[in-house]
Image (tube, helix red, strand yellow):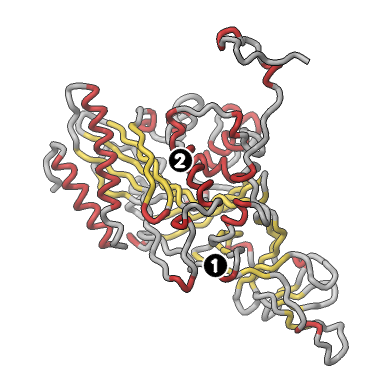
């Protein structure tokens, strides 16, 4: 067998494919999500969306989440439930169950299961049978919010309160839910949340301009952890005109949530603290499949361009279509988006085969945080139990465009972009003790001060 010579100079390794055929193994600590795995147990400590509310009408829905086969349902009283899929009597699938006034009834022998796993009826048993009191069926707590159904699949004693995200109730925001299936590992989908540079290429230059032309401009990038273990931001700052500087922060929330600003932002008009456009959970179906469930935020402040199309938000569709599969394979080749880029990294991306560069600092930082979390090295990366108190989750995704005149020296102006990005981040973090309109007003005031301090005239 021919052995690859590591001492061979790189420029002499042309046509070296023969020696590079065998891909290393994936990283199981971060990518495997089944019961008992390190990452699987960590993800189960958080509320995870499992389906859209519209899925639960008069029939139950079979779902697979983190390698577990489940069934979700809404009983006739309106309560939602998530049960282990196979009946604890003889194993028939409860996806064929009959929705009852209270709970879900197995089609095979009529056993009736309440949402919490209590066995309410075993109609084939003799009168007086105590069988139904002797055990419970597997069940998980649920919570329904703005068109999504969530489940908590972790240890009962560690169940956190359902997270309340700051700013979601401003500007008469309406939340439209969506669902997109992605046939690859969950981590490579969420890695995309901390990779701002791909927007210059995948979305803006080679195939077509999927975002605005301002995304083609080279950004000054910073990657910064957010308070209380809430995640990591990528901050990109671009000079869009001689007078304007646009800062954009996207927020990868712990552990699998991504928040981003509008794809139609141009940074060509002054704005202070324009908030989140979409919130997305990348939920593992199993090790090689993911379902992205989330909300599109609809309000005039985040979408002043009037481009929102609610008919394009829902099942396997979003009004930024780079997130979903193209209609045909060749269409994906001609105009690939995030879906094609993520799924083509192999069903599970192989980190040992990557050659990471400076622009991958956010990916590296986030993977490091997740590794620390699953190893129990950072308690701040776990949610507080429901009886331990909780606070609203501060969201950091935003767009800010300030009047900051260009500096004559290019190197000085580039450094100025870095300062703007840091000052915007610091202004938002300084408001971490506030919420809602009070937080919005505080940040806007601070950013106006930043604009003035860096050489522009005050806003009117």
Instruction: List the residue tagged with mark 1.
Output: 158
Q: How many labels does the image show?
A: 2
Q: Residue at x 65, y 56 (%)?
A: 65
Residue drawn where x is 12% and y is 44% of the image: 458
Q: Distance between the residues labelled 2 and 1?
A: 26 Å
Residue 206, image x, y percentages: 49, 24
Mark 1 burial class by Cα count in 10 Å: few <14, some 14-19, many 20+:
some
Q: In this view, does 84 lie above or below 268?
A: below
Judge by depth and name the residue closer to the eye, 324 or 351: 351
For this view, does 434 lie left or right of residue 21?
left
User: Could you tell whether 247 is left or right of 366 in the image?
Assistant: left
The mark nearer the N terminus, 2 or 1, is: 1
The residue positioned farthest toward the left in the image shown: 457
**x and y percent of residue 379 in the render?**
47, 57
Residue occupying image coordinates x 28% and y 31%:
240
Q: Is mark 2 on a helix, strand or loop?
A: helix
The residue indicated by pointer 2 is 365
Q: Residue 45 location, x and y as percent? A: 55, 61
Residue 144: x percent and y percent? 54, 67
Front position in the image: 31 or 460: 31
Mark 2: few/some/many CA within 10 Å (<14, 14-19, 20+): some
Query: Would you say 228 lies left or right of 430 here?
Result: right
Against 306, residue 242 (above or below) is above
| Mark 1 residue element | helix
Front residue of 132 and 214: 132
Image quadrant for the N terminus? top right
């Amino acid at each position: 067998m021919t052995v690859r010579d590591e001492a061979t100079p790189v420029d002499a390794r042309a046509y070296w494919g023969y020696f590079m055929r065998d891909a290393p193994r994936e990283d199981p600590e971060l990518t495997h999500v089944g019961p008992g795995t390190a990452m699987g147990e960590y993800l189960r400590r958080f509320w995870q969306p499992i389906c859209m509310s519209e899925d639960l009408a008069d029939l139950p829905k079979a779902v697979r989440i983190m390698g577990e086969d489940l069934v979700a349902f809404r009983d006739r009283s309106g309560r939602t439930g998530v049960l282990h899929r196979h009946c604890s009597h003889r194993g028939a699938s409860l996806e064929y169950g009959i929705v009852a006034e209270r709970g879900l009834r197995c089609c095979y022998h009529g056993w009736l299961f309440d949402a919490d796993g209590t066995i309410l009826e075993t109609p084939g048993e003799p009168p007086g049978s105590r069988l139904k009191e002797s055990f419970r069926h597997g069940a998980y707590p649920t919570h329904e919010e703005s068109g999504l159904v969530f489940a908590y699949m972790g240890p009962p004693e560690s169940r956190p309160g359902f997270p309340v995200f700051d700013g979601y109730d401003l500007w008469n925001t309406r939340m439209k839910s969506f669902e997109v299936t992605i046939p690859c590992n969950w981590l490579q989908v969420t890695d995309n949340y901390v990779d701002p540079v791909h927007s210059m290429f995948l979305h803006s230059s080679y195939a077509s301009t999927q975002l605005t032309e301002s995304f083609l401009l080279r950004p000054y990038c910073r990657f910064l952890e957010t308070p209380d273990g809430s995640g990591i931001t990528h901050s990109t700052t671009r000079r869009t005109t001689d007078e304007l500087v646009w800062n954009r922060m996207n927020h990868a929330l712990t552990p699998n949530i991504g928040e981003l600003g509008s794809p139609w932002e141009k940074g060509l008009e002054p704005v202070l603290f324009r908030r989140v456009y979409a919130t997305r959970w990348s939920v593992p179906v199993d090790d090689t499949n993911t379902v992205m469930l989330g909300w599109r935020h609809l309000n005039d402040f985040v979408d002043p361009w009037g481009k929102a199309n609610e008919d394009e938000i829902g099942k396997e569709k979003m009004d930024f279509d780079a997130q979903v599969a193209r209609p045909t394979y060749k269409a994906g080749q001609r105009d690939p988006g995030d879906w094609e880029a993520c799924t083509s990294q192999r069903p599970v991306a192989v980190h040992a085969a990557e050659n990471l560069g400076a622009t991958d600092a956010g990916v590296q930082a986030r993977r490091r945080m997740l590794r620390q979390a699953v190893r129990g090295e950072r308690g701040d990366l776990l949610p507080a139990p429901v009886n331990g108190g909780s606070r609203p989750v501060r969201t950091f995704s935003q767009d800010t465009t300030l009047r900051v005149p260009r500096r004559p020296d290019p190197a000085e102006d580039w450094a100025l972009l870095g300062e703007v990005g840091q000052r915007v981040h610091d202004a938002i973090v300084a408001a971490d003790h506030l919420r809602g309109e009070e937080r919005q007003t505080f940040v806007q005031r601070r950013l106006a001060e930043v604009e003035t301090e860096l050489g522009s005239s005050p806003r009117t």
